[in-house]
Image: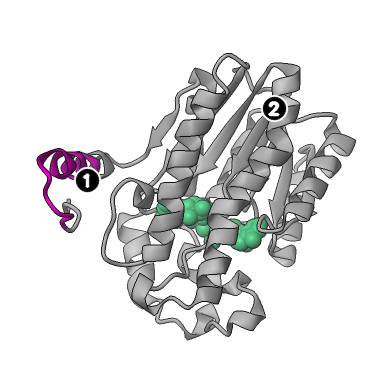
């Protein structure tokens, strides 16, 4: 699919991978709707792009609220007439191991990471099907292909997004609407500061109280740049490629998982680079 002159919607667009996607789509000549729950960061990102001459609209939207996502679709259609590319990208990684995750925390993570994707598909895909053209990019994670013993709820939602995306790709075959599933390993973003957007009722510690030095070290030494992820996403949309795997190690981890599954072996910790 050619993207210049078309309309993209990106959720989680005020930071990290979503912001890099918005910037790249603007550079490719698209009109872009930036959606995010973090109002201040969203306004700063949208104004910066608009000041540079881009056709952008910032819409505050909590993807875990289906009414908000329906409003996002309506605002998009009012501003730009339709949508061609939808990136269901917003996500949070403030989970604990499953044993330590309270029901309310499960609910938040599932609402954002899984139901946010589902609501995006429900609101936008019918427009794309009706026009016989479009592309949906769902941000899952390597954590949706192979599990570690940490972050059980995060793995659960990301495995779910992979399954949902695979199914959607089959469901939409022949409609002109393509689907991609983005499964990065580590990318240099604010994902480990996700509690900044948690409902206050959860009583989670703000990022300032989380020891960040080790994470920052990891991010600066090992993580991929968001702009590099955005480049692969654009390539995948153009080529109508489903899998967007950004790190070679992810394929090795998936291979180990599949071999264990085939041999009837129990899960092992993921292969290290
Ligand atoms: N950074 C990584 O290493 C990595 C790896 C694999 C997958 N991912 C996935 O990439 C996606 C983007 O995350 P990121 O790494 O750029 O992190 P980030 O924290 O920098 O960006 C996430 C954005 O999502 C927004 N957001 C959070 N909750 C929201 C909600 N309810 N509604 C709307 N917006 C909301 C945040 O405000 C933020 O702007 C997530 O789905 C994440 O799980 C990240």
Instruction: Give the CA distance from mark 2 to mark 1.
Output: 33 Å
Q: Using the image, tell me which numbered label, if any, was put on residue 84.
A: 2
Can residue 21 be seen by looking at this rendering? Answer: yes
Marker count (numbered): 2
From the viewer's side, name the closer residue of 136 and 118. 118
Residue drawn at the location 38% of the way across and 48% of the way down: 144
Residue drawn at the location 62% of the way across and 53% of the way down: 12
Can residue 47 be seen by looking at this rendering? Answer: no
Q: Is residue 246 one of those drawn in magenta?
A: no
For ligand 1, tell me if the residue under mark 1 lies within 8 Å: no
Q: Horizontal placement of 100 versus 19: left or right?
A: left
Give x and y (percent) for residue 137: 55, 36
Task: Give the magenta part as a residue range.
Answer: 252-268
Quarter of the image for residue 214 reads bottom left
Q: Using the image, tell me which numbered label, if any, was put on residue 253.
A: 1
Question: Relative to 175, does residue 81 appear above or below in the rendering?
Answer: below
Q: Is residue 264 one of those drawn in magenta?
A: yes
Residue drawn at the location 73% of the way across and 66% of the way down: 40
Give x and y (percent) for residue 5: 73, 23
Residue at the outermost front position: 264
Quarter of the image for residue 111 reads bottom right
Q: Secondary structure at mark 1?
A: helix
For ligand 1, tell me if the residue under mark 2 lies within 8 Å: no
Question: Relative to 78, does residue 173 appear above or below in the rendering?
Answer: above
Question: Relative to 146, does residue 152 appear above or below in the rendering?
Answer: below
Give x and y (percent) for residue 155: 38, 57
């Amino acid at each position: 699919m050619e993207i210049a002159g078309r309309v993209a919607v990106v959720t989680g667009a005020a930071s990290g991978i979503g912001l890099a996607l918005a910037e790249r789509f603007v550079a490719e000549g698209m009109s872009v709707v930036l959606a995010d729950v973090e109002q201040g960061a969203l306004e700063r990102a949208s104004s910066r792009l608009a000041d540079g001459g881009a056709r952008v609209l910032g819409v505050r939207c909590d993807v875990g609220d289906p009414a908000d996502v329906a409003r996002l679709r309506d605002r998009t259609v009012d501003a730009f007439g339709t949508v061609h590319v939808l990136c269901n990208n917003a996500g949070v990684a403030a989970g604990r191991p499953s044993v330590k995750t309270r029901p309310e925390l499960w609910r938040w993570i599932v609402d954002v990471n899984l139901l946010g994707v589902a609501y995006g598909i429900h609101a936008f895909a019918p427009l794309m099907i009706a026009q016989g053209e479009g592309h949906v990019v769902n941000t899952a994670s390597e954590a949706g292909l192979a599990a570690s013993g940490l972050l059980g709820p995060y793995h659960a939602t990301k495995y779910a997004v992979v399954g949902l995306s695979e199914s959607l790709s089959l469901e939409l075959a022949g409609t002109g609407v393509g689907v991609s599933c983005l499964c990065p390993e580590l990318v240099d973003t604010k994902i480990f500061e996700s509690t900044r957007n948690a409902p206050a009722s959860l009583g989670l510690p703000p990022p300032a109280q989380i020891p960040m030095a080790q994470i920052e070290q990891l991010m600066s030494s090992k993580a991929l740049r968001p702009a590099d992820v955005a480049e692969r996403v654009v390539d995948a949309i153009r080529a109508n490629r489903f899998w967007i795997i950004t790190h070679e190690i992810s394929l090795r981890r998936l291979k180990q998982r599949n071999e264990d599954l085939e041999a009837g072996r129990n899960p092992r910790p993921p292969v290290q680079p």
